[in-house]
Image (tube, rainbow, N blue to C red):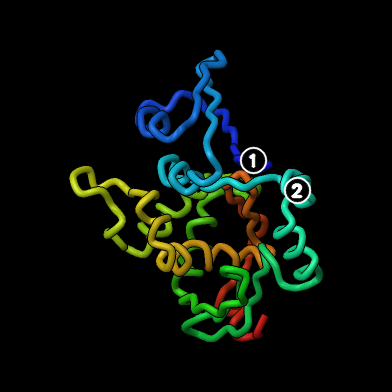
Amino acid sequence: MKTNLLFELELPYLQTEYDLLKSIALNVENIGHSKFKWIFKIEDIEKVVRTLGKTFEFDDEDIKKMIPYSPLMEEKVGIEAGTKGKGYFKIIHRAPKLFICETIINEKPVRQKVPTENVSAMWKVMNAYSIGRYIKSSTVAENVITELEITRFNRGESGNFDFAKFFGERADYYRYFYGPLKILQSEGVIEHTKSGTVARLADGWDLQTQIRLGG
């Protein structure tokens, strides 16, 4: 018997996004206190992410519960156990002008270049916040893009940053935001949570020193 996977979100009332979410959702329920329970098909997750302008992740334990009911997933998990998988990230090379990093895309290791100026911009943005203060990823992304003086992700009339547009440009999203974020996370100076927030964990980290020392 074939099943359809759904996912549920509880969100406050979002005036701008309400009609867009309603056009995607299978069901929406007012649960009181200005909160709504939304039900979506798993296949619509990217539409929901673009509409909300932020990412979210499923709990690993919930995913594990589905493995026995999907022969293909169970086979892949068995094959990939102990190998590079989701969440894998490694700095392969660091130089004055760029980092070369390895991550997993479509189940294959891929090496990508991240300019050091983007890492520097990310670290400068995070230093504007106190240690341990968690900031929404979309806010951090906007501040990084502003620091780099990039305007092509802004809305035409208002000039405001359009995170959904930025998130949809996957190469730019990696180059300007995700790559620098993961580099700083691998250095142990910031934390990126599953709920889509970022916090600075340390003082005194210097990019040029790390490049010069090789770590």
Q: Quadrant of residue 3?
A: top right
Q: Is residue 90 above or below residue 96?
A: above
The answer to whether the residue labelled 2 contacts the one labelled 1, judged by CB atoms less than 8 Å apart, is: yes
Earlier in the chain: of badge 2 and badge 1, it is: 1
Q: Is residue 66 above or below residue 149?
A: above
Spot occupied by residue 203 in the image (x, y as percentages of width and height): 64, 60
> What type is the residue that disc 1 sits on?
Thr
Residue pictured at 61% horizontal, 51% vertical: 199
Q: Is residue 60 visible?
A: no
Which residue is more in the foreground, 201 or 35?
35
Residue pictured at 53% horizontal, 67% vertical: 180
For label 2, the residue is 69
Q: Which mark is residue 51?
A: none
Which residue is more in the foreground, 62 or 14?
62
Q: Is residue 32 visible?
A: yes
For label 1, the residue is 3
> What type is the residue that disc 2 sits on?
Tyr
Spot occupied by residue 77 in the image (x, y as percentages of width and height): 76, 63
Badge 1 marks a residue whose secondary structure is loop
| Badge count | 2
Spot occupied by residue 92 in the image (x, y as percentages of width and height): 63, 82
Residue pictured at 65% horizontal, 62% vertical: 189
Residue 12 located left or right of residue 151: right
Q: CA distance from mark 2 to mark 1?
A: 10 Å
Picture quarter with the N terminus: top right
Q: Is residue 150 above or below residue 27?
A: below
